[in-house]
Image (tube, rainbow, N blue to C red):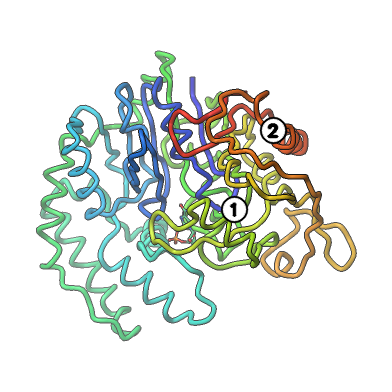
Amino acid sequence: MIQLVIGSQWGDEGKGKIVDIMAAKADLVVRFHGGNNAGHTVVINGQKFPFHLIPSGILQKKPTVVIADGTVIDPDVLLEEMDIFEKMGINLKKKLLISPRCHLIMPYHKELDQAYENARGKNKLGTTKRGIGPVYADKVSYNGIRIYELLDWPLFVEKFKFQAEIKNKILVAFGVIPIKVETYLSIFKKLAERVRPMVRDTFAIFQKAIKQKKYILLEGAHGVMLDNSFGLYPYVTASNVIEGGVNIGSGVPSKRIDEVWGIVKAYTSRVGGGPLPTELFDKIAEDIRERGYEYGTTTGRPRRVGWLDLPAVKFACLLSSINRIAITKIDILSGLSQIKVCVDYKLDGKKIEFSQCGYLELEKLTPIYKTFSGWKKDISKIKSFKKLPINCQKYVRFIEKYLDVKVKIVSVSPERKASIFV
Ligand code: IMP
């Protein structure tokens, strides 16, 4: 079986926890795009495990985890995460595989990301400054350096020097101190030696697994609204987040995917700039942010929050053939007397579809809400759907009907155990 888990909103939907639960039975857990701009947190017996690059399935016994072709790797972050997991007693040589096609985030990518953001001034996009845009730009313009080159040291040094020379000219034009290649060589050398035993032909591994009907779990990062083509460009990330990104980023044919799980947070959140039609600015926003701990796993930035935006989520479902939904963080809404859900958009008095909107329309339109009565009870220990307060059940059923996709999991607390299978 092949399962894909993707975020249906602006990222931070709680994918890490859902992937972690599913990973218990998986043979392979695969990341296929993005880099350490993503962050996922898994909570086990009260202990938080935040990580950025290595797939969430690493904490489960059974699966082998794969950093596949479309993922971009920051050497510092990979080495740091490898250290953490090795200290926990996980044998990464057996547990982790890396594709040679993965591009490396070089020091100049991070500097360029920062320099572009500074130059944009009030129009800054709010990137995570992890070098993501510049590394993918180099990839598509044939200027990237991959794990493949890293394993051939003289070739790597030659390419690194050549690229650094060009990038340094751009950095100087931005008024930024150029990078010194020598400072970074030792870290890349260390990375090369550490990853060498884990680098494999992941294409062949996936093909064999498909033939043997193994269970492959594909772990999406970010959210569909941040997709480079279908998100609200330029307020997007540099990779393809949608279902088609699987084929591009791992070589696993999208046609082979059996289940596409859309993760829907019970409200909306977003880090970074760009319009957010259902954004809240009042006391309710503060409450949701504090209770939901809506601060970036990667940057620590406070996340913007708002009511659930169903036209946007519906777009994500159609775009990525989502056929199963997991609703997360619904417990954060407990205690609110009323809960609103956006069901339509209106612009100049006329209905407008999400797909017709760019950022200019989204800034101006009026969200049309349906209001639900809330529930007071703490639901974080509830184990069955029928035991949830009736208003909570109505909320879930409404989402299901609107999206026309079955809700299969309702997550009621960050704990691994706290998931209701519907
Ligand atoms: P970048 O991916 O760092 O280039 O940032 C581009 C945009 O995507 C910014 O608005 C980021 O805040 C947002 N972004 C990237 N990754 C994530 C994520 O995993 N969760 C939420 N927002 C993200």
Q: Distance between the residues labelled 1 and 2?
A: 31 Å
Q: Name the residue under label 2.
A: 389
Label 2 element class: loop
- What's the amino acid at mark 1? Met
Q: Residue at x 55, y 43 (%)?
A: 7
In the rendering, at what x and y percent does residue 122 appear?
A: 53, 81
Q: How many labels does the image show?
A: 2
In the picture as drawn, the residue positioned furthest to the right comes out as 349
Q: Is residue 268 left or right of residue 56?
A: right
Q: In the rendered image, which quarter is residue 114 located in? A: bottom left
Q: Is the C-beta of the residue carrying label 1 under 8 Å from the nearest atom of ligand 1?
A: no
Q: Is residue 256 above or below residue 293?
A: above
Q: Is residue 189 left or right of residue 418?
A: left
Q: Quadrant of the C terminus?
A: top right
Q: How crowded is mark 2: few (under 14 residues within 10 Å), some or many (20 or more)?
A: some
Q: Which of 127 and 329 is in front in this view?
A: 329
Q: Residue at x 27, y 41 (%)?
A: 100
Q: In this view, does 330 lie above or below 25?
A: below
Q: Which of 116 and 103 is in front in this view?
A: 116
In the rendering, at what x and y percent does residue 326 appear?
A: 59, 34
